[in-house]
Image: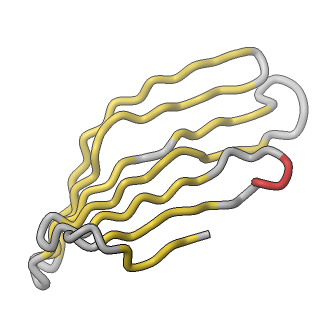
C-alpha cells in the first residue's frame, strides 16, 4: 500500500434566495507510507450562485492550510472570492519548519 487517505467532515449550508453556501469543517489526512510523509489540509467554502434565476456558477474561496507533519513544513494558500479583478486568483506562502519562506504564490 502506497498511501492512505481519510476524511473527517461536517458541512454547514446556508440557502438565501439567490445562492447556496456550503462551509466545510474538518481535516483531510494523507499518509504516504512509502515516503514517510503525513499531510493534513482543510477544505474551502463553496458558493453556488443564481440557484433560482439566472445562469448557475460556482465560486470557491477561503484559506487552505496544508501541513506536512513529518517535516514541519506549512503552506497557507488563500483563494480569493470572485469579485471583479480577483476572480480566480490565489496567493500564499510555503514555510519551512524553521519559519523560513520557501515560496511565495501571487
Q: Residue furthest right?
A: 54
* Visual colour scheme: secondary structure
| Residue ID at (63%, 18%) | 15
User: Looking at this view, is 70 or 58 the one in front?
Assistant: 70
Q: Is residue 1 left or right of residue 79?
A: left
Q: Is residue 44 left or right of residue 60?
A: left
| Residue ID at (41%, 29%) | 11
| Residue ID at (87%, 39%) | 55
Residue 3 image point, x, y percent: 18, 73
User: Looking at this view, is 30 or 77 the one in front?
Assistant: 77
User: Looking at this view, is 18 or 44 the one in front?
Assistant: 44
Residue 40 image point, x, y percent: 25, 57
> For the C terminus, which image quadrant?
bottom right
Residue 81 image point, x, y percent: 68, 45
Q: How many marks can you see?
A: 0
> For the N terminus, which image quadrant?
bottom left
Q: Residue furthest bottom?
A: 34
Residue 39 sits in quarter? bottom left
Residue 36 sits in quarter? bottom left
Q: Is residue 11 left or right of residue 41?
A: right
| Residue ID at (53%, 54%) | 78
Residue 54 image point, x, y percent: 90, 33
User: Looking at this view, is 102 or 60 the one in front?
Assistant: 102
Amino acid at each position: 500500500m502506497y498511501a492512505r487517505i481519510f476524511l473527517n467532515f461536517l458541512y454547514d449550508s446556508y440557502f438565501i434566495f439567490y445562492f447556496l453556501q456550503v462551509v466545510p469543517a474538518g481535516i483531510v489526512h494523507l499518509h504516504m507510507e512509502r515516503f514517510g510523509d503525513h499531510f493534513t489540509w482543510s477544505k474551502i467554502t463553496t458558493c453556488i450562485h443564481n440557484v433560482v434565476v439566472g445562469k448557475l456558477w460556482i465560486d470557491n474561496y477561503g484559506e487552505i492550510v496544508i501541513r506536512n507533519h513529518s517535516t514541519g513544513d506549512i503552506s497557507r494558500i488563500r483563494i480569493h472570492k470572485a469579485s471583479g479583478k480577483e476572480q480566480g486568483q490565489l496567493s500564499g506562502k510555503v514555510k519551512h519548519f524553521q519559519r523560513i519562506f520557501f515560496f511565495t504564490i501571487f
